[in-house]
Amino acid sequence: MDSLLTVITSTLFAGLAMALGAAIACFEKIANKWLEEELRHSVIAFGAGALLSAVAFVLVPESIEILSPLSACLCLLMGGFSFLFLDIYLKKTNTSASQLAAMLSDFIPESIALGAAFATGSSNALLLAGLIALQNMPEGFNAYRELNATAIYKPYKIIITFAVMALLGPIAGVSGYLWLSDEIVIIAGIMLFASGGILYSIFQDLAPQVTLEKHWAPPMGAVLGFMFGMLGLIITT
């Protein structure tokens, strides 16, 4: 019961990081335009670094120990191609929620894997929970800016919507805890699928937005994001 409660609380707080990122974006307007640009690009870069650390330190290492090389490569490619086709579909339908779709497409499979990790007593479960929260905040920041730019959605409605969507985390996490704890092959496949999608998102959506001419802080945001993931690995192992 204690483990199940941990799954619920950790996935909920990780999901609420999306709403926190949206709230930060809501107050992003700063009198100094240079500082505003630097901050916005640094937050996006931080998210890319955190996403990359989740792939490098948790999702891929744990999965390749279970799956065959061919299966691992196929799962990773399936994740990448799924995000590619989703991206193409959203562009063709002129949907202004590609960042939101990408955020949820990461969050749900990672929460399933997190629930299963807690059920199996994985030493990296808490690390994965922290990394999900770290990546959700910048993704929420980015998704808020995308939705708010359309002038259709009011800021407070976006933040409330993100907070409600955080409930998907406990639902996915409890599902993984109750029904997939013994299915280590399926969990490994889900983690690699998510990794493929994350890598696609980093280089399709996040990395291109980081660059600023004659500005050097944003790349350090990516380094800091990756550093927090590395630090979490050191502390929990």
Image (spheres, rainbow, N blue to C red):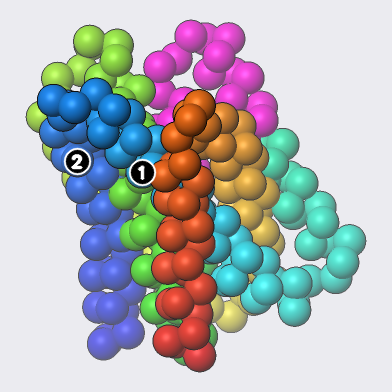
Residue 176 in the image, given as x and y percentages of width and height: 47, 68
Residue 178 in the image, given as x and y percentages of width and height: 43, 74
- The stretch of residues the image draws in magenta is 83-106
Query: From this viewpoint, which residue is outermost toward the right?
Result: 70
Q: Amino acid at mark 1?
A: Val
How many other residues sit within 10 Å of disc 2, few (<14), some (14-19) or many (≥20)?
some
Q: Is residue 176 left or right of residue 157?
A: right
Secondary structure found at label 2: helix
Marks 1 and 2: which is nearer the front? Answer: 1
Which is nearer the eye, 121 or 4? 121
* Snapshot quadrant of residue 129: bottom left
Instruction: Note whether 59 is above or below 231 in the view shown.
Output: above
Question: Do the residues under discs 1 and 2 have CB atoms within 8 angstroms?
Answer: yes
Residue 40 in the image, given as x and y percentages of width and height: 33, 35
Which is nearer the eye, 234 or 140? 234
Instruction: Note whether 160 is above or below 97 in the view shown.
Output: below
Residue lying at 56% horizontally and 37% vertically, measured from the top left: 207
Q: Amino acid at mark 2?
A: Ile
Q: Which residue is mark 1?
A: 43
Residue lying at 66% horizontally and 27% vertically, measured from the top left: 85
Residue 200 in the image, given as x and y percentages of width and height: 64, 40
Secondary structure found at label 1: helix
